[in-house]
Amino acid sequence: MLLSQEGEKIPVEVSTKVTQVAQQPGIILYIRDIRERLRLQRIIEEKNQQLLESIEYARRLQVGALPSLAQVQVLFPRSFLLYLPRDIVSGDFYWIAEKSGKRFLAVGDCTGHGVPGAMMVMLSLAFLNQALSNLVTPTPAQLLTFLHRSLCNTFDTQRVRDGADILLLEWSEGGMLRWASANRPLWYFREGEIIEEKGERAPVGGSTDPTYVWSDRLLSPIRGRLFLSTDGYADQFGGERAKKLTTGRFKRLLGETASLPLAEQAEYLRRFFSEWKGNLEQVDDVLVVGLEL
C-alpha cells in the first residue's frame, strides 16, 4: 500500500529489475496503481456469484421437476437410477407416468448440457405431460410424435435444430412391453448376455422432419433386466490411457454386473465410473436406469 498526498491508501503492485547505473549495480522499482484492476475483479466476482446462485436455483427447479427414486419405484419397484449431471444442471432427464393401467418410463438426452440442455429438459417434461393429458390411449410412439411436433412448433427449425434422443417404454400388468425410440437403443440381459434392440435413427426436434411419425414395437415378457441409458457413461474418457470407455465395454459391464442386486449394481456402476474418470473432466451428463419387470 502507498499513501496519497491526501492520506488515502492506494493498493499497488511492485516489481523489480536489476540493472547497472554508472557501472554500479542497481535496482529499478516499478510501482503500479491497481485500484481499477481490483474494482473490475470485484465486479467479476460478484457477477460470477450471482450466476452461480441463479444456476443453483435452476438446479433446484430441475430436481423438483424430476421424480425421486422413491417415486420411480412406486411404478417400477425393482429399479435403480444412476444420475450424474456434468454441470450443476443437466441435459439428461427421466420421466414416469401412469394412465389406464399402463406405466410409462422415458429416458432422454437433450442437445447440449448445462443451462441450454436444462432448458430443453424442462420443455420436454412439460410436453410429455401435456401429451399424456391430451391423448386418450397414449402409446410410446404417440408420445414421442407429440413431443416432436411440439418442439418443432415451438422453435424455428431452420435456425434451432436442437432436440433430444429418447427411449420410451410402456409396461402393463400382463407383462407385454411396448416401446418406441428416438435414436437410443434398448438393452436387456438374457441367458448371460446383453441383447440390443436398436431404435429409430431420428431424434425428436428440429433435425428431424416435422412430419415424422414414430412406430411402436413390442417385446414379449422379459425375465431379467432392462437398461435405458444416455450416451454419457460410454463416452467418458479415462483409464490408464485416457481413452473413451465405448458402448461395447459399457454393455459388457452391464452384463457382468447384472447378477448383483439392483442397488449394488447401481453403486458398482457409480464407483467404476468415478475410478475410470479419475482426475479427468466429466465430458457429458450421465443417466442409466435399470429395471426388472
Image (cartoon, helix red, strand yellow):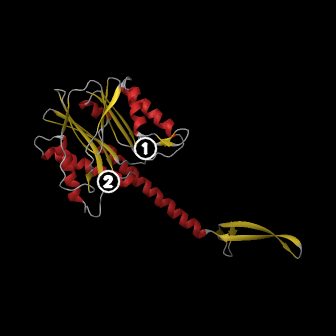
Q: Amino acid at mark 1?
A: Asp
- The image's mark for residue 201 is none
The mark total stands at 2
Say which quadrant the N terminus sits in.
Answer: bottom right
Q: Position of residue 256 (x, y in %)?
A: 41, 27
Q: Amino acid at mark 2?
A: Met
Residue count near mark 2 (Cα–Cα under 10 Å), binned few <14, some 14–19, many ≥20: some
Per the image, the residue denoted by label 1 is 235
The residue lying toward the viewer, choosing from 227 and 66, is: 227
Residue found 56% across the figure and 38% down from its top: 240
8 is higher (above) or lower (below) than 189: below
Which secondary structure, mark 1?
loop
> Nearer the observer, disc 2 or disc 1?
1
Which secondary structure, mark 2?
helix
Between discs 2 and 1, the one toward the N terminus: 2
Q: Gap in Å between the C-alphas at discs 2 and 1?
A: 22 Å
Left or right, 278 with reference to 34: left
The residue lying toward the viewer, choosing from 22 and 260, is: 260
Q: Position of residue 18 (x, y in %)?
A: 80, 68
Left or right, 95 with reference to 282: left
Residue found 40% across the figure and 50% down from its top: 56
Say which quadrant the C terminus sits in.
Answer: top left
Image quadrant assignment for residue 129: top left
Residue found 46% across the figure and 36% down from its top: 273
Left or right, 45 with reference to 80: right
Per the image, the residue denoted by label 2 is 119
Q: Position of residue 118 (x, y in %)?
A: 34, 51
Q: Position of residue 74 (x, y in %)?
A: 25, 30
